[in-house]
Amino acid sequence: MSLWSRFATNRAAVFGLVVLIAVILLALFAPVMFPNGPWQMVQRPFLVPLTTDGLPLGTDTLGRNVLAGLIYGARVSLLVGLVSTVMALLIGVPLGALAGFYGGWVDECAMRFTEFFQTIPNFALAIVLVAILEPSLTSITISIAIVSWPPVARLVRAEVMSVTRREYVDAARLAGLSNMHILTRQVLPNTVSPIIVMASLMVATAILLESSLSFLGLGDPNIMSWGYQIGAARTVIRSAWWLSFFPGVAIVLTVLALNLIGEGLNDALNPHLIRKGKS
Amino acid sequence: MAIAGTILGRLLKAALTLLAIAVLNFFLIHAAPGDPAAVLAGEAGAADEQMIADLRAQFGLDKPLYVQLFTYVGNILTLDLGYSFRQGAPVLDLILERLPATLILTLTAFWISLLAGVALGVAASARVGKFTDSLITGTALLFYATPLYWAALMAVLVFSVQLGWLPGFGYETVGSGYGGFDRAIDILKHLILPALTLGLFFMAVYMRMTRASMLEVAQQDFVKTARAKGLAPATIRRRHILRNALLPVVTLAGLQAGQLVGGAVLTETVFAWPGIGRLMFESLAARDYNTILGVFLVSAAMVIIFNIITDIVYRLIDPRIGHKA
Amino acid sequence: QQDGGRLDLIVQPEPPGLMLGLVQNGPTQMVAGQIYEGLLRYNTDLEPQPSLAKSWEIAEDGMTYTFHLNEGVTWHDGTPFSAEDVVFTTKFLQDNHARFRAAFSHVESVDAPDANTVVINMKEPYGPFINAFEAGSMPIVPKHIYEGTDYATNEMNATPIGTGPYKFVEWSKGSYIHLTKNDDYYIDGLPHIEDLYYRVVPDAASRAVAFETGEVSVLPGGAVENWDVKRLTEMDGVCSTSKGWEFFAPHAWMWLNNREGPTADKRFRQAVMFALDREFVKDVVWNGFGTVPTGPVSSKTNFYTDDVPQYPHDPEKAKELLAEMNYDGTPVRVLPLPYGETWQRWAEAVKQNLEEVGIKVDIDSADVAGWNEKTASWDYDMAFTYLYQYGDPALGVARNYTADQIKKGSPWNNVEGYENPELDKMWAAAAIEPDNEKRQEMYTEIQQQIVEDVPVAWLLEIEFPTIYRCNIKNLITTGIGLNDGLRDAWIEQ
Amino acid sequence: MSVLSINGLSISLPTGADRELAVKDCTYDIAKGEILCVVGESGSGKSMTANALMGLLPEGLAVAKGTAIFGSTDILQISEAEQRALRGDRIAMIFQEPMTALNPLMRIGDQIAEVFEAHKRHSPSERKSRALDLVREVGLPDPEKIIRAFPFQLSGGQRQRAMIAMSLALEPELLIADEPTTALDVTTQAQILKLILDLRERRGMAVMFITHDFGVVAEIADRVIVMRHGEIVERGTATEVLEAPQHDYTKRLLEAIPTGQVPQSVAVDSQPALEIHHLEKTYLTGGGLFRPRRDVRAIADVSLTIAKGEVLGLVGESGSGKSTLGRAIVRLVTPDAGEILVGGTDMAALSESELRAARHKVQMVFQDPYASLNPRQRILRALTDGPIAKGVPRDKARARARELMDTVGLGAEAVDRFPHEFSGGQRQRIGIARALAMDPELIIADEAVSALDVSIQAQVLDLLRDLRRKFELSILFITHDLRVAAQLCDRIAVMQKGQLVEIGPVSEVFLNPQHAYTQKLLAAVPGGGWGKAAE
Ligand SMILES: Nc1ncnc2c1ncn2[C@@H]1O[C@H](COP(=O)(O)OP(=O)(O)OP(=O)(O)O)[C@@H](O)[C@H]1O
Ligand SMILES: Nc1ncnc2c1ncn2[C@@H]1O[C@H](COP(=O)(O)OP(=O)(O)OP(=O)(O)O)[C@@H](O)[C@H]1O
Ligand SMILES: [Mg+2]
Ligand SMILES: [Mg+2]
């Protein structure tokens, strides 16, 4: 069975994929749908959802279109999630690969370095980094990447270690291939499945992290994001529930979708794990 | 004997790690824009150059950075975490004052999440593929995907404001004059909401992990052996599968337990819980260098201590570790 | 009037310390204002009232101030209070209190001819001097505790000793500060309330909840975001008042960097004024509280005039001005004040207004430390701020517009870099002019000129409503409101 | 009187499997006190039959039809609870893999006592002492200590004894043993087989013994069933089947078995291809928290030579250091001391880059045909990467790869396929082709045929024999299967605990072993019968 057909048998994962694609499409077409951007004050503040034409989700504290904010927020969440994950992979994969492949003092150094980042609680470190770099889309993305790479490094290290022990790697050594060649062509390709699975979950975590930072007021003030919307709305949560409700639902849905996709990928990429009890 | 020796060695290594962490954190914090003098002066509502210069001199911030670093490292080596000029108290006192609240909160959340997570994971794995399983995994996934602060806000709205069952914030009833048992009950009431919201996410994590681990262990040969003995399924699950399935959960729990001290910033903020996380966050905004560094150091120490504890627990569960193979 | 009871108030953020002589930020003043006292208080019309001083005289020529102190006053630790403490205080504050230092730069000497009399001799007459004696401007500190010690690290800072109506009991960091009634207070029958709890609740929404659930019964101005004010005040048994801020008259504006960038051009600054829809912000962001200012002086402050150039919301006019100066579209950075959602929304509204007339805006972000750093080092194009006026232009306004106040490192002076030598002279003359009518004339002229130049964009005379349960009586009786008002407050049981 | 009689048993596989029925229409009986051996190659349905009887079929598999009368009930029809009551009590089972069949976190004694508990026999303290008796009965040393030990503290053979003790606990009428000795080395295997024979004597229980090793069959079987693709193709008494097989398949199986006959070896006395002098390797392990350091001297002062065109067999029980020696020769393990001269160059002394250039001289064929090919790489890449790195032009390397695939009998077109498209035996041929592609002087074959079914094993051995003649190859053939060694090798080296205890021509070593250990090893081979030297 092909990867796709294995994936497609998992209904939850397909649902996740559909949701994610919908979010991506909305994000892509945001400027078409709302050419004036999410910040424009279009109506009276605090309009209740479904009471005004053209403003199905109502307006916020300044009379901005909540729907527009939600859709523009998708761009930010996805962007931060993807870019920070890619960055974390760029740090974690090489480090973990070298540590796992060479072992010995390389491993020792790399793992001490990794441990180091793990001794400061994730979220606290992210807060400090954003505060130091001053909140902006770039600094938030970088900070999230910096706090999320250690698990990647550990995973890649473990995978590389186990693959390196396989006999075909010995065979490649005997063929006189260089270490780099062996690592990049023989070992790493065989570790991609767990990395892909982890990456899909990391995107979800990054989205949550971004929203938490925004909630604490450490977001980029020029950018409409879901965390910003909730953070901005929490003071009016009693009188205007919808302002924090919809972005909250958006986060939950997106993160949920990514998780479902991750699990689906996990099942599809590791067919030897007998999947039980999922239709 | 040998164990005591290795633990000692490990503690020594931990101490060196801590020192390195302190140095790195030092540079990290000093890289942030602004300094405590400017913040203090800024908050004063009026300040002039002289005042800021005075404050800098008083805090030792007028010295070159490396001198400040040496002073700091020197202090740490004598177990002195320094003085918070902003709060006018030794950092250690500030931290010790806040630590109990944080530990109560995070440890409660930790145990709730661990016990409930494992219990649900076991329940789900026992009925894998059935409705109960879908219900548990679905709910867990939902908890997993819900931002913590949002859950916290909603919980306060419902249980505190609408229903009035539980206090919505704070650590205890202020000025109640409660003592002893009454006070404990009072704190417990305040604890429920924050501990639950903090615990939900990790509960989901443990649940998923336990379930996956249980299913995996169930495939192993020795489970078949147990079935061949004619043992009842419940006994097999409890005695054979669960114990083995717990090993990865313990590893994860150890990792998480270490992060407890500094990991509750959001919860402490939303619930006005007077803990370390908030101290860190507020000190950061005020560039109260010594306090932030102190908090980081204490939490790093916690991580290391919990790593050692995890190893010990692991050893208790798994006899293979620690014996001659 | 009834004695007894307990009052829970919000204090936000948690004060860094309670020793009012060392720390004078808002939260400290609010709590420590019950512990320490000044020589005088001011009513809501800003007229001086007795406090530690039961009476006072000012010499005709304005060169001598004589204060007669209350008798039988003791510090909270039982030590008798005397004029020596006042003399010591003037030395203590020289080192630790910038605003005091500025006001007392006009003072020649301070003497204590006897235990209950203090005489201040001036170098020159200084009109606003009589406004500089409340607890925040000049808190009287105990000589017997601080003399000869390092003030900043004195252990007693943790357990402040004052003469005020309430005594310090306990500070549970991150949670609450507990004060209790001073039974030996020198005014018989005062105070009425037994215990005060200042509660620390870091999240604005939780503070609103705390008030709703009755856990706290006083929300000082700014404790909850403006959007919640309406809902809370509409609850049964809840009262609110805008009184108690007259002395401070908080005045909000944006510093426009006069030195460089598009904001260095006067036409650009005027265009900004025309572009801003300040009424909208007042109505939406501030929920209708406050007044749109006409210029640098608040309408609550003495010597105010509205006879100045006007800047109504007029985008067309703004565009004209921008076209005239050939604005090239250089983006400007707007630095909001990191004090919560209101200020953030405000910056967003400003950004929208400016972008409507074609000014490209990036909102800069910074936490409190970063904001201090950026404004103090002039690294901004437009920066939000608000400052107190202390009842007199010479105390609270001049510092923001005179050239001698252009100093890097402080966010409280002429940060925008406005220089106008003509006006500088007039500011100086007005401060030491004994005749109030002449002062008014001078300040009118100053205001007209400054409003024409638009060194900063004045946004709002802020009004912070205090929200409280109606059974609390006499809560706000002075021009600094809650900061020293609890002396007279009582709770109807 | 039969204890169990199976009638028309069929077991269905889940849809999408390679065939419809795992077991098809099987009928046979097992009498009291009888040992019935079920043989057949991998996947023939041996285990599934056993599992069906225990009611332990994996998910997706189900009994399609048939009956299995045990006592007076059809155990395929009864409820799960009734089956559970039967399991461990009247029918017991032992599994193939002793390393994983015991709960790693539970003491041996508790695991044995658990059987009593499952069937509510005896009081808790009595259970303990019964467990002790059982441990004693299966001949485990130091029983008091063993019952308090954890599985990891026991060797494979000891664990298998513990398993047997467990299965005997309630004196079952039927013992099902699913390849109980396959994972063990010969000496241990011999002990376990003896134990089972003993117990059968003493207790008179019926045993269903599943195996694919005809040596074992010869050793213990009363009657034999041969299975293939889920069907029974032959049945009869042990002698009937072994000596006069009727079915073609059985014949082929028996032919493929390396005989116990030892060829008269021809001394090879050309120049040495490999010389090893005083080789040493000690592994340092552990040193983690709570874990004391441990030294394992895997190679202790080993010296030997292999002549050009010679096949040297290296035998010895598990853990004796055979693999370590082989890996040291190719420098996958760096020796601590000693010389390894390949065609005159000392492999042990080469630097990293020199080594890479010299590597092609010695190649290796690995044990596990599944793990030794990169699953994401086409065969062509596997065969050409090495030569290209060595400097052979791409075109030439490709042409040679095709040629070699022909040589090993897979056909040149097969180079464009992925490993998973080949069977185990085919993969092993690819492994050999890969080694040959480097034009080596010496090939190390580490258990190169151990993982293969006998019939396939024979093919691969034939291939090796061919190639050796064709290319004048020297081969170091590492194996624990003495029969296989006898078939292929010119000389035999015997290792024990890192030391070379005996080396000499095949006929010498097998017929006239000098060292006590070698004698013990030879005696342990099931179905032994050496001494028939071919003329
Ligand atoms: N869990 C399972 N799910 C699906 N098919 C299985 C499962 N286990 C075994 N099979 C299939 O059932 C058939 C019979 O397998 P069985 O394990 O009985 O073979 P065997 O004779 O014991 O082989 P071996 O000697 O390798 O143990 C095979 O085709 C196999 O692929
Ligand atoms: N990488 C290693 N680290 C530590 N010890 C090892 C390592 N590899 C092997 N050993 C130990 O060295 C000894 C020899 O192992 P080796 O693998 O050479 O044995 P073997 O004769 O090949 O056994 P088998 O027949 O089981 O393959 C054993 O005791 C083994 O536990
Ligand atoms: Mg089998
Ligand atoms: Mg081996």
Image (tube, coloured by chain):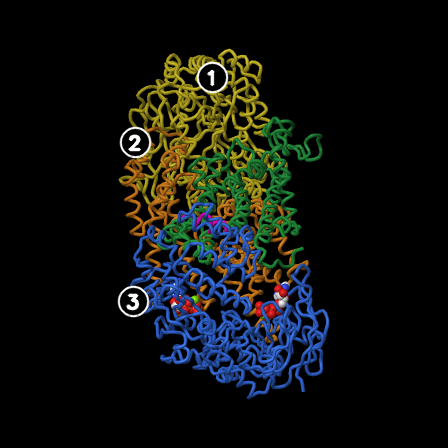
Chain colours: A green, B orange, C yellow, D blue
Taking the magenta stretch, the answer to whether it contains residue D286 is no
Label the magenta part by its dominant secondary structure.
helix
Q: Please identify, in this view, whether the residue under mark 3 or under mark 2 is nearer the observer.
A: 3
Q: Quadrant of ligand 4?
A: bottom left
Q: Please report contact status of discs 3 and 2: CB closer than 8 Å, yes or no.
A: no
- Chain of residue at mark 2: C
- Which is nearer the eye, D6 or D383? D383
Dot 2 falls on a residue whose secondary structure is: strand
Task: Name the kind of residue labelled 1 in the image.
Answer: Val
Residue at 48% x, 77% y: name it.
D260
Quarter of the image with the C terminus of chain C in it:
top right
Q: Residue at x 29, y 29 (%)?
A: C111
Secondary structure of the residue carrying tag 1 is: loop
Instruction: Identify the mark at residue D278; answer none if there is no mark.
Output: 3
> Callout 3: helix, strand or loop?
strand
Graded by Cα atoms within 10 Å as few (under 14), some (14 to 19) or many (20 or more), the crowding at tag 1 reads: many
Position of residue D442 measured from the top left corner of the image (x, y, whole percent): 39, 61
Q: Which residues are magenta?
A: A180-190
Ligand 2 within 8 Å of disc 1? The answer is no
- Kindly report the distance in space between the C-alpha atoms of the residues bearing marks 3 and 1: 94 Å
Dot label at residue C454:
1
Q: CA distance from mark 1 to mark 2?
A: 46 Å
Above or below for D483 versus B92:
below
Q: Is residue B295 visible?
A: no
Disc 3 to disc 2, C-alpha distance = 102 Å
Q: Are marks 3 and 1 in contact (CB under 8 Å)?
A: no
Q: Are marks 3 and 1 on the same chain?
A: no
Q: Can the viewer see residue C309? A: yes
Looking at the image, is D181 positioned above or below residue D459? below
What label sits on residue C112 in the rendered view? 2
